[in-house]
């Protein structure tokens, strides 16, 4: 569920304290509504899609905020100690401090789930979701795990999952799974109270396009756009994919003034 990492912009991060945790942030001032990047599971704020949006924000004088969750990238904390609740609190705290005026939330993979969860509190003006991994701890992890892996998580508290995006395995903890169950959304209606544009690759092995359709079925009938990219993978980081992302952000929240 991680994004491809491409740390090309080495602008020093600014540390922001949220709930006692120090988070690395990058803020580009500009016109609103501010755009806030919510990255994926084990990704960081310097990933390819975030960099593309930052370049767009620089060209168009748009306000853009990005950050690393606790235990991700340049932020403090240990990844294996964190859960969805922690990363949701990070997102809500960053928005409250740096983009309080009805931002556009752009969530990639896990960030899509975080954006939907945060919507009730931060009241965004729009959501752009890239391969949204809604309920992924349950639907895309636990329900897909063989019984022996489930037993290992329950017995040992953690399973080290190999990743094609990182040489290091990803710790999947019992705390992550159990906490995720407190945030499940796909069992009922989902109304973020704003327009939603979903970008989804149909060749995505991590978040299958039919999983995105489960979310679409639970969103309101009005104000929702789904763009399916038949050849698209999970990362959606090619030049055409990045153009679609920028167009989606521009379309869902035109510049003020």
Image (cartoon, rainbow, N blue to C red):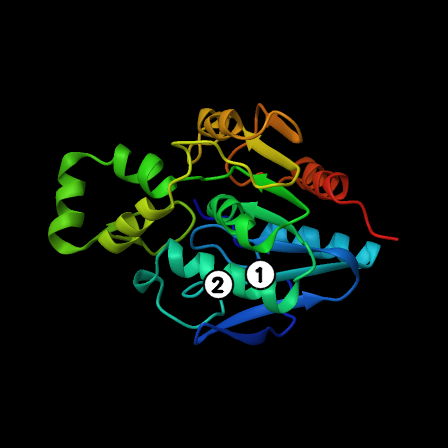
Q: Which residue is mark 2?
A: 90
Q: Is 181 left or right of 37, judged from the image as shown?
A: left
Residue drawn at x 63%, y 39% as measured from the top left: 238
- Relative to 247, is 176 above or below? below
Q: Is residue 26 visible?
A: yes
Label 1: element kind: loop
Residue drawn at x 38%, y 46% as measured from the top left: 183
Q: Is 185 left or right of 36, judged from the image as shown?
A: left
Residue 98 location, x and y as percent? 64, 67
Q: Is residue 237 visible?
A: no
Residue 101 location, x and y as percent? 70, 59
Who comes first in sequence, dot 1 or dot 2? 1
Question: Which quadrant of the structure image shows residue 6?
Answer: bottom right
Residue 225 location, x and y as percent? 65, 29
Residue lying at the far right of the rendered structure: 257
State how far apart marks 1 and 2 are (Cα).
21 Å
- Relative to 163, is 233 above or below? above
Label 2: element kind: helix
Q: Which residue is mark 1?
A: 7
């Amino acid at each position: 569920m991680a994004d491809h990492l491409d740390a090309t912009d080495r602008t020093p991060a600014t540390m922001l304290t949220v709930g006692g945790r120090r988070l690395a942030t990058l803020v580009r001032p500009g016109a609103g509504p501010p755009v806030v990047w919510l990255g994926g599971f084990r990704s960081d704020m310097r990933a390819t899609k975030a960099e593309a949006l930052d370049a767009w924000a620089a060209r168009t004088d748009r306000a853009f905020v990005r950050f690393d969750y606790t235990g991700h990238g340049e932020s403090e904390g240990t990844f294996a100690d964190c859960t969805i609740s922690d990363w949701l609190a990070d997102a809500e705290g960053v928005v409250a401090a740096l983009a309080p005026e009805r931002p556009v939330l752009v969530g990639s993979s896990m960030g899509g789930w975080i954006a939907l969860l945060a919507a009730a509190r931060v009241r965004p003006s729009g959501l752009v979701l890239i391969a949204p991994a809604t309920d992924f701890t349950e639907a895309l992890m636990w329900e897909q795990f063989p019984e022996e892996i489930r037993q290992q998580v329950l017995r040992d508290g953690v399973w080290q999952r190999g990743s094609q995006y990182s040489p290091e395995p990803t710790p999947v903890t019992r705390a992550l799974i159990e906490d995720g169950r407190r945030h499940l959304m796909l069992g009922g209606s989902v109304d973020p109270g704003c327009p939603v544009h979903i970008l989804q690759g149909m060749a995505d092995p991590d978040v299958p396009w039919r999983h995105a359709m489960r979310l679409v079925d639970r969103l309101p009938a009005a104000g929702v756009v789904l763009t399916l990219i038949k050849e698209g993978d999970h990362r959606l980081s090619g030049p055409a994919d990045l153009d679609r992302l920028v167009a989606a952000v521009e379309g869902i929240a035109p510049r003020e003034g």
